[in-house]
Amino acid sequence: MAATRIDDKIRRSDALSKARGEAKYVSDYFFDGMLYAMMLRSTEARADIVGITHPVLPEGYYFITADDIPENGVNSLHMIGKDWRCFASGDVKYVGETIGLFVGPSRAVLKSLVENTKVEYAVKEAAVSIDDAIAVKGGAILPEKDNDVMCQLYCQKGREMDDVFKDADMTLSETFETGFQEHVHLETNGAIVTEEGDSYVFYISAQCPFYVRKSVAGLLGLPLDKVIVRQTVTGGAFGGKEHFPDVLAGPLLVAESKIHKPIKLIFDREEDMEFSVKRHPSKVIYKSAIKDGKLIGTKGTIYYNCGAYLSASYVVLQRGVFHANGVYDIPNTYLEGYGMATNTFPSDAFRGFGAPQTLFAIEMHMSHIARRLGIDPADFKKSMFIKKGGETVTNGHVVEEVMLNDMFDNIAKESDYYRKSREYGYGSGRGIGVSFYNHGGAFTGNGEQAIIKAHARLKKSGEKVTIEVGSTEMGQGFQTSLRKIAATVLEIPIEDVDYPNPDTSIVPDSGPTAASRSTMVVGKLIERCAIEMKERWNEGDFSVEKEYEHPEGFPWDQETFRGDAYLGYGWGAAIVELEIDRRTNEVLVKGVWTSHEIGKAIDELIVHGQINGGVIQSLGYASMEKMENKNGHFKQTSMSDYVIPTSMDFPKQYYHIQENPYQFGPFGAKGMGELVFNGVDAAYVDALERAIGKEVYKIPLPPEDIEEALENA
Amino acid sequence: MLDNKISFTLNGKKVEFIGDPLRRLIDTLREDFGLTGVKEGCGEGECGACSVIKDGKLVTSCIIPMGSVAGSDIWTIEGIRDTELGAIIIEAFADGGAVQCGFCIPGMVLASYVLLSEKTNPSELEIREAISGNICRCTGYDLIVESIRLADSRRRGV
C-alpha cells in the first residue's frame, strides 16, 4: 500500500462499520446480569423537598439518593465549578434536577416506580428568564448573594465611552435576543457502569472521558485511577456531551458502589429533550456611536441565561464577550458580560460556545447601521473588517492575514449578490442577506498551557502505529483526520495507523474534545510525535509522548482578560437568499453560499461535511428551532414539537474553502467545527428583514414569530 | 398479559416471536434478535433512525407493535448490507462522505435501498423526498444526497 499524503481523498475510517450497522453505541452493549436505571427528577423549578415516598421496592430493586454517598465522598460533580449536585438534597433548583435513581431488572417496573413516587415540595417562586434574574425574582438563587449574577466580566479597548459618544453624529441602540437551542444529537445520552477488579468502569457516550472521571471520583472519595472511562461510539454531541455525561455518571457510580452489577442508563428522547443542557439564551444590548459613516465606538451589555448551576457558563460568557465585536475593528469598545443564574436546566456548551449569540447580534446591528447610512450592508461591513495585527477587544492582536474580502468576492460572484441586493430592495418579498463571522481556536488565552496541559502519544509496534489520545470521535471525523496527519508525517499508509476510542486507563489526557481545539492542538502534538518517531523509526518498538507548548509572544492575563484571547481564528462569510409567502409567512430558502478560512483542510470531504452540517444547524437555529421555557418547564419535549431541519428544508449549499496556512497548526490547519455554525443565522435574518421590509431583533423566527414581528413593527 | 405467537420473516428467514403483541418491533429486533443496527432516535416515528423495510416499504419500527408484524417480511440493515444493492449503497456512503456520527445512517441506507429499488436515476428532489423521514443532525444532507446519486450511477454501471 502506498504511503498516505495529506491531500489524498480517503474514506473515513468509521464509515463502513457505521453504515453497516456494526458500530456499537452505548445502548448496543449488553452485559450479563445487567440492570437498568431510571432517574427520579424534580418537577418544580425551585422548592424545598419536604418528603419523598416511593412504593415498596420489589426484590432486586434499589432506590439510590444523596444518602448513599459515603462519608468520605461529596455530593458534587466536579466540573469547572463544584456547585452542580449529583443528587438534589433538601431542595431543588430546576425542573429535572436528579433526586434519586431507581435501579432494577425491568424498565417497565422502573417506570412505574418513578411514576408512583411522591415528592412533596414547599414550592417557591422561580426565576426563569434573564429578566427574572435581573429582577432577582423569588430572591437570589445563589447562596450568600443578593443578586443572580453568577459570573461577569468586562473589557475595554480604546477611549472611555462617554468621550467617544460626544464625537458621534449618529447613535443607535438596539437589543437582540436569542433562544434556547437543543442539541438533538441523534443518539440520546447514555452510560453503563460496571466493575473490573477494584476499579469502576464506565462505557459512555461522551466527548470528554477525562472530564467524567474527574467529575465523579470525588463522590466516593476515590483516587482518579479507580474510575476508568471508555468512550463508546458517540452518535453526535455538539457540546451536549461535554459536561452533561457527568450528570448520568455520578448517580450511576453511587448506585454501583451499593449494587455491584452492571447498570445501564439510557435517556429516551423525551428525557433527553426535557432534561438536558441547552444553548444559553441571550440578551445583547448594543449602543453604537457613528461618525462620518464609520462606526467609532460600541458599548455592549451581554446577558446569558446560565440556569441553576455554573457548568461551563463562565467560559461560554467569556467567549461571547470576546466575539462581541464580530469581525470588525471598532476603534473603541466597552463590553460587559453577565451570566445570570435562573431556575432552568443549566445551560452548557453547544457548538459555538457563546460566540453565536453575540455574533448574531453584532451582525444584525451592523446591517441596521448600514441601512441608516444608506449603504449596502456588505459594503459597510467590509469597510470595518479587522486586519492582521488589528487590536481585538481584549487588547490582543489578530495573528493571521484576514482574507474576508477575497472570501466575500467569491460568494458574491457565485450568488450574484450585488444585482440581487439592488433588485430585491427592502420589502419585496424576496431578500438576499450577508454575514461575516469568526471563531477563536482552542481554549481562551493561556488555558491550553495553564489548565489543560494536553498530552498525546504515538506507539509503534512492528510496522503499525497506534494513536493514544483522550480526544474523541463524535462524528466530526477526528479519528480519520488524526490518522491522516500521523500517516503523512510517518510516510506510511493510513491503514497502518490505529486510533481506538479512548480508555482513560490507557491513553494520556489530551484535554477535552471541545473548543475546536482537537485538530489545531492535539493534531499538532501528534504531528510532533510523528516527526520524532519518523527519525527513530528503526529503533524497534517504542512510544513517543509530547506535551503542549505555548508559542512565545502571546501574553494573556486571565484576571483582567487582557491580551491574546486566541492564537488564531477561523473566518467565515455567508450569503442566504430567500422568498417569503406573504400569506403564510413560510420562508423558502433559494440559495446558501459560504466561504470559510480554516488554515488548511486536513481532509476536504470531512470539512465539506462539517460545513454543510454546521450551516444547517445555524439555519435551524434562526428559522425553526424554538424551545420555550414556561415556569421552568421546557414546552417542546419531542422531535415533533421541536423541529430540526429535514432534507427538504434547505437547498444544496455552495461552499468555498479559503486556504491560508496557519503557522501553529498541523499542515497549516486551524479549528473549524464551531466556526461553521457561527454566522449563517445572521445572513438568513438579514435576508428575511430585506424580504419583509422590517427589522427583527430575535431568533428563532418561525412563521408565527415573523407574523408577530410584522404586527409589532 | 397473554403471550401471543407471531410468525414473520426476518432478513429472509422464518422466525417466531412469543410474547406481548404490544411489544415494539424495535425492542424485539434489538433485544430478542440482537439486531442492534436498528437505532432508537426518538421513539415516536419522527426521526427514522429505527427504519426497517416491512413488505417492501420503509417503516419506523419504534411505533410498530409486534401484533401487526404477523406474516410480514421484515428486513433490517443486517439483512440488507450484504445484498448487491445494499453493498453498493454502503460503499457509496463511505466514498461520498455521507457518514458522520452514523446514528441515522443504517436508516438512511434502508431509505436509499427502497428508493433505488423502485426508481432508476432519481432526481435530487426525489432523493430528498425519499430521505425526508430520516433526520440527520450532522451532515446537512448534501453529501447523503450525493452519495445516493453515486450509488445509483454505480449500480447502473455509469
Image (cartoon, coloured by chain):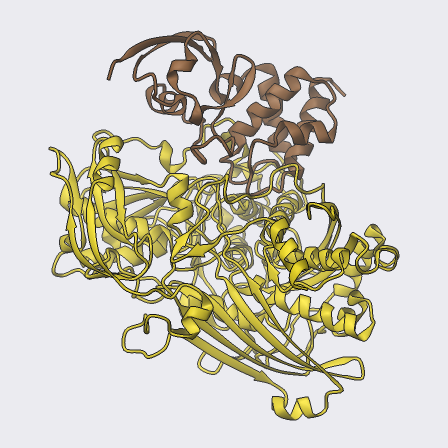
Chain colours: A yellow, B brown
Looking at the image, residue A290 lies above or below residue A628: below
Looking at the image, residue B55 lies above or below residue A329: above
Query: Which of these two is toward me, B28 or A142?
Result: A142
- Position of residue A137 measured from the top left corner of the image (x, y, whole percent): 37, 71
Question: Which quadrant of the structure image shows residue A712?
Answer: bottom right
Query: Which of these two is toward me, A261 or A479?
Result: A261
- Position of residue A316 measured from the top left corner of the image (x, y, whole percent): 48, 66
- Position of residue A53 measured from the top left corner of the image (x, y, whole percent): 14, 47
Question: Which quadrant of the structure image shows residue A76?
Answer: bottom left
Q: Report whether residue A180 is seen.
A: yes
Quadrant, the C terminus of chain A: bottom right
Residue located 69% across and 73% down the image: A328
Q: Report whether residue A702 is seen.
A: no
Quadrant, the N terminus of chain A: top right
Looking at the image, residue A530 lies above or below residue A565: above
- So how many labels did they put on this image? 0
Residue located 70% across and 27% down the image: B126
Looking at the image, residue A104 lies above or below residue A561: above
- Position of residue A529 measured from the top left corner of the image (x, y, whole percent): 49, 55
Query: Which of these two is toward me, A405 or A664?
Result: A405
Question: Which quadrant of the structure image shows residue A167?
Answer: bottom right
